[in-house]
Amino acid sequence: MTKTTLTTRMRTLTRLTVANRVSAAYLALVGGAMAVAAAQPLFATGPDASLIWVWPPLFTFPAFGFVAWLGEAGWGGDAPTWFFVGGIVLSALVQALALGALWRGLRGRRAERTHHLTAAN
């Protein structure tokens, strides 16, 4: 594989992950949930303040399920915080890539259909 091919593939993956509307909106949602969860303990001191951290894993759930399983298998349910926060970030990026690929596939089909249906052909 040449360097140009590798660079092209990396650019394509990056575009699919962060450079389209659907992926960007999803990443903004997850990032916002994590920012609110990180800021919540600064403003709330009640016993339920830590329950806000339920939302970021729920937004990344299908991929985060694997991270939770790894945490349970590796640390016996006592995984460090960095593992779960990193897992949320990695899960969000994987799902943003999947959403970007789905969006590109749907847009590509629509563009092909409209290209074949134009009167200019």
Image: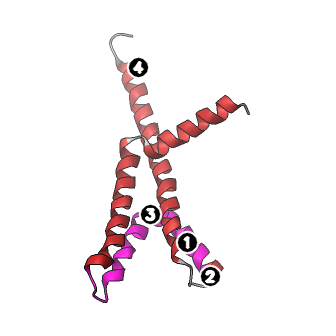
Residue located 58% across and 76% down the image: 71
Mark 4 secondary-structure assignment: helix
Judging by the rendered image, the residue that carries numbered circle 3 is: 60
Q: Residue furthest right?
A: 1
Q: Which numbered tag is attached to residue 83?
A: 1
Rounded to the nearest angstrom, the CA distance separating label 3 from label 2 is 21 Å
On screen, residue 61 versus residue 5, left or right, reads left
Disc 1 residue type (three-letter): Phe
Q: What stretch is highlighted in magenta?
A: 44-72
Task: Say which of 116 and 39 sits in front.
Answer: 39
Q: Which of marks 4 and 3 is in front?
A: 3
Q: Nearer the viewer, mark 1 or mark 3?
A: 1
Mark 3 crowdedness (10 Å alpha carbons): few <14, some 14-19, many ≥20:
many
Q: Which numbered tag is attached to residue 51?
A: none
Disc 2 residue type (three-letter): Trp
Q: Who comes first in sequence, dot 4 or dot 3?
A: 3
Mark 2 secondary-structure assignment: helix
